[in-house]
Amino acid sequence: MYQFSYADILADDADDARARERQALDQASAMLLHAAEGAPGSVEEGKAVDFTTELWAMFIKDLAHPGNAMSDELRASLMSIGLGVMAECRRISLGESRDLASLAEICGIIRDGLR
């Protein structure tokens, strides 16, 4: 019979969570880049912006949770980035911006930092 320490199980869970976060950020980046190729206000743009906004809202909620093990400084920095991404998504939704490629790049940078 196999025996795993609680720490090993938590480490595996954290690794799985990081993999899912990387995958979600990769999807957001791909959707944003695809939308950037289309017309402003397209269905693809709306879906990309909505997905990215919801993803970052989830990240911010997790980062704000008192049980989050990241340093306060890193959590604050990531929350600031997330709020900026969400603000830009809102500007895109309102037709005030079309900077989808920059949002895709930010998602890619954060994704790469999760390795």
Image: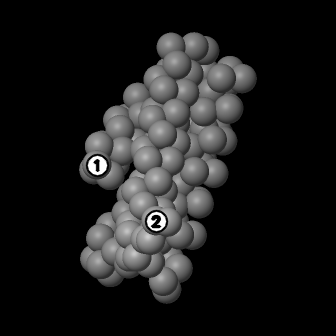
In this rendering, the answer to whether 110 lies above or below 39 is below
- In x, y percent, where is residue 29? 46, 33
Please name whichever residue, 95 or 70, is drawn nearer the observer in this view of the structure.
Answer: 70
Please name whichever residue, 101 or 114, is drawn nearer the observer in this view of the structure.
Answer: 114
Q: Nearer the viewer, mark 2 or mark 1?
A: 2
- In x, y percent, where is residue 7? 38, 76
The residue to which callout 1 is attached is 115
Please name whichever residue, 64 or 2, is drawn nearer the observer in this view of the structure.
Answer: 2
Mark 2 nearby-residue class (10 Å; few <14, some 14–19, many ≥20): few
Q: Which mark is residue 55?
A: none
Q: Upstream in the sequence, badge 2 or badge 1?
A: 2
Mark 1 nearby-residue class (10 Å; few <14, some 14–19, many ≥20): few
Could you tell me which secondary element the residue under label 2 belongs to?
loop
- In x, y percent, where is residue 17? 48, 56
Please name whichever residue, 8 or 95, is drawn nearer the observer in this view of the structure.
Answer: 8
Residue at 49% from the left image edge and 86% from the top image edge:
66
Residue 32 visible in the current orientation: no
The residue to which callout 2 is attached is 2
In this rendering, the answer to whether 74 lies above or below 17 is below
Residue at 57% from the left image edge and 70% from the top image edge:
61
Q: As drawn, is 26 to the left or to the right of 76?
A: right
- Identify residue type, mark 1: Arg
- Identify residue type, mark 2: Tyr
Residue 51 visible in the current orientation: yes
Q: As drawn, is 52 to the left or to the right of 104?
A: right
State which quadrant residue 103 falls in. top left
Residue that extends furthest to the right in the rendered view of this protein: 43
